[in-house]
Image (spheres, rainbow, N blue to C red):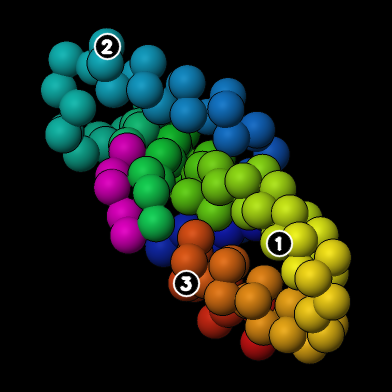
């Protein structure tokens, strides 16, 4: 995934969600002032509760305070395995009951939106 910072700089996100989550939690727990704004070279992390779970994010800044790398773990990535499991089980159960494909598809859409209502907007 690639994100753009406010300065227009493009940053590649390559870390695994678990690694970034551990890094963020560890950094927040050991920071002498976790709410301080960046002033130059260094790393900043955050965790915030959002409507679908917890958003973990980590940023590394150069000496001018520009973002040189970042990692974000969004709730969708944290919920993905459960969504996949539930979709497979929903499909299996309703196929055995003889439901039509279109009906199963609608139920699957409802299931996904119950986990993450933003998915349906992001895939139009």
Q: Decide whether residue 98 is among the magenta residues.
A: no
Task: First in sequence, mark 2 or 3: give its number.
Answer: 2
- The answer to whether residue 118 is visible is yes
Q: CA distance from mark 2 to mark 1?
A: 43 Å
Q: Is residue 37 left or right of residue 117?
A: left
Q: Give the residue drawn at x 52%, y 71%.
A: 113
- Quarter of the figure with residue 103: bottom right
Q: Give the residue drawn at x 19%, y 27%.
A: 34
Task: First in sequence, mark 1 or 3: give its number.
Answer: 1
Q: Which residue is mark 3?
A: 117
Nearer to me, 53 or 98:
98
Q: Give the residue drawn at x 16%, y 34%.
A: 35
Marks 3 and 1: in contact by CB < 8 Å?
no
Q: Which mark is residue 30?
A: 2
Q: Which residue is mark 1?
A: 90
Residue 10 placement (x, y as % from top left): 61, 57
Q: Is residue 63 left or right of residue 74?
A: left
Which of label 2 and label 3 is nearer to you?
A: 3
Q: Which mark is residue 23?
A: none
Q: Which image quarter is the N terminus in?
A: bottom right
Main secondary structure type of the part rendered in magenta: strand
Q: Give the residue drawn at x 28%, y 22%.
A: 28
Q: What element does badge 2 sit on?
A: helix
Q: CA distance from mark 1 to mark 3?
A: 18 Å
Q: What element does badge 3 sit on?
A: helix
Whether 47 is drawn above or below 31: the answer is below
**Magenta residues, start to end:** 47-51
């Amino acid at each position: 995934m690639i994100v753009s910072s406010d300065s227009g700089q493009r940053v590649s996100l390559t870390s695994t969600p678990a690694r970034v989550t551990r890094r963020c939690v560890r950094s927040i727990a050991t920071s002498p002032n976790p709410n301080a704004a960046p002033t130059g070279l260094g790393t900043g992390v955050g965790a915030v509760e959002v409507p679908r779970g917890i958003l973990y994010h980590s940023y590394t800044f150069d000496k001018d305070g520009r973002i040189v790398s970042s990692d974000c773990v969004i709730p969708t990535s944290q919920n993905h395995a459960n969504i996949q499991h539930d979709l497979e089980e929903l499909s299996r159960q309703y196929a055995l009951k003889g439901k039509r494909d279109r009906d199963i598809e609608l139920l699957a859409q409802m299931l996904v939106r119950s986990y993450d209502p933003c998915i349906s907007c992001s895939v139009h």
